[in-house]
Image (cartoon, rainbow, N blue to C red):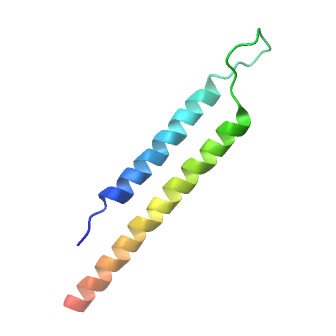
Amino acid sequence: MADLSIALAGINNGLELAGATAARIAKMPTVASAPTDTVDLSAEAVAMMQAKIMVDANVQVAQNFDNLNQAILSILA
């Protein structure tokens, strides 16, 4: 039987992406100042959506893995 390590790694990667994106957004200046490195909110919104999709997809993989294991156990029982 396969293991959940791939799905768990994907979930972890998605959560790390979301955390890094949130950190970049949090560093965004709140007042107008001299032009510096600014946060592109559109790019960060896309990154957050990518992180959500990544986590959702890997959760579905884990659920399918669980369903498959349950089916195998019911056949073998």
Up/down of 35 relative to 48, above or below: above
Instruction: Tell me the residue at 75%/12% (across/down).
Output: 35
User: Which quadrant, please, contains the C terminus?
Assistant: bottom left
The x and y percentages for residue 20 are 52, 33
List the single residue furthest toward the right.
32
Up/down of 35 relative to 54, above or below: above
List the single residue furthest toward the top.
34
The x and y percentages for residue 37 are 67, 18
Up/down of 63 relative to 9, above or below: below
Decide if residue 31 is in sight here: yes
Instruction: Tell me the residue at 57%/52% (across/down).
Output: 52
The x and y percentages for residue 27 are 62, 22
The front one of 35 and 23 is 35
Q: Is residue 34 left or right of residue 69?
A: right
Instruction: Tell me the residue at 59%/49% (across/down).
Output: 50
The x and y percentages for residue 61 are 42, 66
User: Which quadrant, please, contains the N terminus?
Assistant: bottom left
Up/down of 46 relative to 61, above or below: above
Decide if residue 77 is in sight here: no
Q: Is residue 41 left or right of residue 67?
A: right
